[in-house]
Image: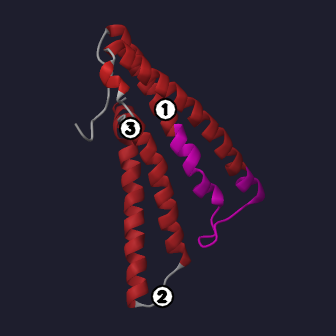
Amino acid sequence: MRILHALNQNAERWLLLVFYIMLVATMFIEVMRREVLSYSSIWGEEVVRYSFIYLAWIGAAAAVKERGHIRIDVILHYVGPRAKALFYIFGDLVMFAVAIVAVVYSLETVHLAWKFGSVTDGLRVSRVWALMAVPVGFGLVILRLVQSFLRDVADLRAGRPVYEGDKLFD
């Protein structure tokens, strides 16, 4: 149970750390190779590119968890706590629908890459691994949206103020 709790709290952070380290280390190695040895590899560019893509999609899930996405919340300053909770629930439901569509269409692309055995240009590994970034990221977004929805409904029923996340500027 502690493992599930730790995953729930930190899964995105750990994944972001792994992909960020891969990106920085590979970029450093490639810059050194290019400057010192006057040679670079195509695999380094691909590792950096795909690490960045995974960073973006997993970061989206982390932002959903923390309610860190950019939003226009001027209206929320003028409504009561109940209306604010309903706005957040509505926003989560809309984003949930978008995430479902994104997962469905991205899985079609993954399926086609798998079906035809498509490989990446430099690494020569299955393109499925690169394309899985979108359904994995949106799958995590869906998980976090369900958790957010359940939290917001519980807060609404209990009369507590809705979780708004950290503010960047106040």
- Confirm whether the magenta stretch covers residue 129: yes
Q: Which residues are magenta?
A: 112-139
Give the Cα separation between the discs numbered 3 and 1: 12 Å
Residue at image position (51%, 72%) is: 45
Q: Quadrant of residue 108?
A: top right
> Residue 83 at x, y = what percent?
38, 15
Other residues around mark 2 within 10 Å, as few (<14) / some (14–19) / many (≥20): few
- Confirm whether the magenta stretch covers residue 104: no
Q: What SS does tag 1 mark?
A: helix
Point out which mark residue 143 bears: 1
47 to 135, vertically: above or below: below
Q: Main secondary structure of the magenta part?
A: helix
**Residue at image mark 3:** 7
Instruction: State how many labels appear.
Output: 3
**Residue at image mark 2:** 39
Q: Amino acid at mark 3?
A: Leu
Q: Quadrant of residue 74?
A: top left
Q: What SS does tag 3 mark?
A: helix
Question: For the N terminus, which image quadrant?
Answer: top left
Q: Amino acid at mark 1?
A: Leu
Q: Are marks 3 and 1 in contact (CB under 8 Å)?
A: no
> Residue 13 at x, y = what percent?
35, 46
36 to 120, vertically: above or below: below
